[in-house]
Amino acid sequence: MTDLGALRAGLRKAVRGEVAFDATARALTTMDASNYRRVPLGVVSPRDADDVAAALSVCREHGVPVVARGGGTSIAGQATGTGVVLDFTRHMNRIVSLDTDACTAVVQPGVVLDRLQEAAAPHGLRFGPDPSTHSRCTLGGMIGNNSCGSHSVAWGTTADSVRELSVVTGDGAAVRLGQDWAGAPDGLRALVEGELARLRTGFPDLPRRISGYALDALLPEKGADVARSFCGSEGTLGVLTEAVVRLVEAPRARALAVLAYPDESAAAEAAAGLLPHGPLTVEGMAADLVRADAGLPRGGAWLFVETGGADAGEARARADAIVRAADVVDSLVVTDPAGMRALWRLREDASGTATRMPDGSEAWPGWEDCAVPPARLGPYLRDFRALLTAHGLRGTPYGHFGDGCIHVRIDFDLMTAAGVGRFRRFSEELAEVVVSHGGSLSGEHGDGQARAELLPKMYGDEMVALFERVKGVWDPDDLLNPGMLVRPHRLDENLRFAVLPREPVDVAFGYPADGGDFSAAVRRCVGVAKCRTPVGGSGAVGSSADVMCPSFRVTGEEEHSTRGRARLLHEMLAGEVVTDGWRSTEVRDALDLCLSCKGCRSDCPVGVDMATYKAEFLHHHYEGRRRPAAHYAMGWLPLWLGLVARTRMARVVNYLASVRPLAAVAKRVGGIAPERGIPAVARETFSRWWSRRFRARVRGFVRDRKRGVRRPFPGFGAGAGSGGEVVVLWPDTFTEHLSPAVGRAAVDVLEAAGLMVLLPPTKVMRFTPVGAALSNGPIGDGVTNGPIGFGAFLPRRRHRVCCGLTYVSTGQLDRARTVMRRTLDLMEPYLEMGTPVVVLEPSCAAALRTDLPELLHDDPRAARLAAAVTTFAEALERHAPHWTPPRVDRPVVGQTHCHQHAVLGDGADRRLREAAGLTGALAGGCCGLAGNFGFEKGHYEVSTACAEEQLLPAVREAADGAVVLADGFSCRTQLEQLAGSRGRHLAEVLAEGLEGLEGRDGG
């Protein structure tokens, strides 16, 4: 039994880096991107090679195993362990040097691949291998797994790019590995020289043979390359501390030929025939992994074939030659960099997309990357499909067709004993199929626990016994990542699903995509870690436009990534490491810096929705307990602002907020960050302006009647007034009380477009026979939702419609449901008529589209209201398609709202801006204020750092006269408070361009 106290004390004394044995650190490292889970004792973040040696010494003294971990994206379970995890991403993550003359780089194991690519790119160089996780995987992990990526057709595997490796062995020796037996431990050479015949005949000859130890690299005719043989050893032979890697010359120009085939078998058969043309990549994927609107040529499967050249013309010519040589259904050649990035993103996201079958059921790794000779790929895929059918399983192969390497996620049932049994039988039979085609059980990600047990089928018992002897030479104490490659764990034990509850957890949200099962929702995170992608980067496809995950981008801490939070929720459900359930402080603290931006809902390849999970957790965590002050101050914001409006105290409130001592007290009591200014409350609410305007129109109607002018009464009945289509303009809390100018501008623009604008009612009135005779629809006065009847003159309490956003974001879900149901009562007549609902505030529109139907999943009216919601730009495009907006002809700068990016989409906005002559693209990322988040005490630094990532630099660098667009109130507030810049809603910009704006009623 390990003495944890002594182990922890020994490590803290010997190591200068962080030593963490707390529940959070352990929970974050129980899993990688595989099906497996192991609970470590603790995590050490070494600062240098001396720290690594010291940590190994202490662990050896206590008999505790060690596993090295980089980005944690391994798919076979080799980045998990039950002892001490060495996390290299925190400190040992530097590019030590870059020698452009020698085309080499010296890197530490924790450096992310894209950082190396960025450093090499200005010199026309790059690191050849590039897995789809290039934006977050580390060089150490790539060397440990001998990773490959899409360009291995041109530049080979990681082993082909390694020159020298600095390693600390299990017995504490620091060695430098290279050719001619450099760095080999005592006994290795003698062992190899006694097995030369076996090593010359026992390894299949194929480009993607990753399984087992690469002992054939130690053959004399191959230079006795100890560094190369170390690649792919999965941390079982030594711990990497530094690497000298080879760089290759990057093509100056590229083109992408997308070749369409009837099905995946046809694409697989064709792939090998394209290799003589010298492509950089030959990647394949089938239609069931691709959206119908992805813009691919017609077909059932595609090959992505990339070519390079000295210039764009040469690259294009090579792509055209490949198209001519290929027998295809259809084809497309793309040379535009943005277009190529968009297409490559489809392929790179497949590792996450494939985790859900078309019907929404779950699929898992396990046979993620076996490889066969490229010429055998077609027959192998047919046998693979037949075996799937025989076992009643489904999977969608994709991957590196040019190298014969296939990725696939299969809908294994890993939750029941029967399902796990089928998983084992299928794995054993498929291993035999792979071997029968001359293949390798692993073609990229390593064997780990997923396939190491099956290595005897590929290599035979004697070769596997030789692997064990080699492990003994390198690591006699079996200290390093035991249970991997040799003497392996069974492939069906340590499954991460075994610890989850078997019965659905009682939750508030409906989780419709997960069958109402919160455990299934949490299981969505398979660990591909796209949420760990920093902004920008040469290889980070689309990352500058992505939102996920703002707090991780600022802190760099795993617990602030979507994956980290999902891991903690997983461990909360498991109850072994995180033991307090919904009361867990570990989960609460990790979720505290979640901005609820919903970026993960769209950017995560598997659609994790951490904003919803956070609201769910907070709901249970504070159930029956006092909440943080900010939850009352900002969660109840609609209530407080409504009270100010009813008592007409806006001027007094604004004055008190301007007195610093009083404002400081109010912020302290309300849990608001002292650095924040309190936004001013509008003296006249948007609805009050509307009522004043409405009354003026009524008076005008009466005057006209007296003069004999006949026209419809304004605002009564569907289709009344201008004769245009009726839309309901949603007076959200922010527009209503804090920025009514946005609402007024929207009314101007919508009416100029020929639409009749109504407001939601504040009184619930039921249809009566008398009322039905008097009107054909709801009254458009923004007061009652029923026709005029005798009950209309009785006193009733007024209520405002509300999306419930502030209650949801603070986890006050019972209150949110009450508010939402009342809103549905008010809106019911409009829902019956199918009237579009225009919502100006993106966060409120997103809440109505997603939170409302998911929280009130038992009320069919919720889905109807969600379907009726449109953004401002969508309303104009759908309901006033022939209207031409005023020409503004100015450049724009700003940021697409997080919720618009994640939930609503911004296509209509881009088209509207283009029609109005508003040129330029908006930045991605998050403004950092995010509703209540940036106002809460303790969040100010993270909030401002998020803004500094993209939004503020874009505004500072804007051209003179540029319009700063910010549709969200939070975004506008952040700009005002941090940059002194006035952001405007698109409606305001268009309203200013309308002729006769100055003559607006009630101006």
Image (spheres, rainbow, N blue to C red):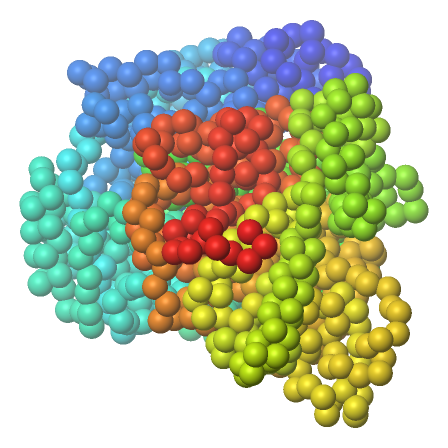
Question: Foreground residue, 428 or 154?
Answer: 154
Residue 439 on image: x %, y %: 34, 53
Residue depicted at 64% across the width and 70% down the height: 698
Q: Can see residue 962?
A: yes
Q: Residue furthest front?
A: 707
Residue 48 on image: x %, y %: 51, 12
Above/below status of 803 relative to 941: below
Residue depicted at 78% across the width and 34% down the height: 652
Residue 263 left/right relative to 368: left
Residue depicted at 55% across the width and 39% down the height: 971
Q: Can see residue 732?
A: no
Quadrant of res 272: bottom left
Quadrant of res 4: top right
Above/below status of 346 relative to 130: below
Residue 492 left/right relative to 786: left
Residue 675 on image: x %, y %: 67, 22
Residue depicted at 14% across the width and 64% down the height: 326
How many marks are shown on the rendered structure?
Answer: 0
Residue 613 on image: x %, y %: 69, 50
Quadrant of res 484: top right
Q: The N terminus lies in which quarter of the figure?
A: top right
Question: Foreground residue, 106 or 671?
Answer: 671
Question: Foreground residue, 185 or 982?
Answer: 982
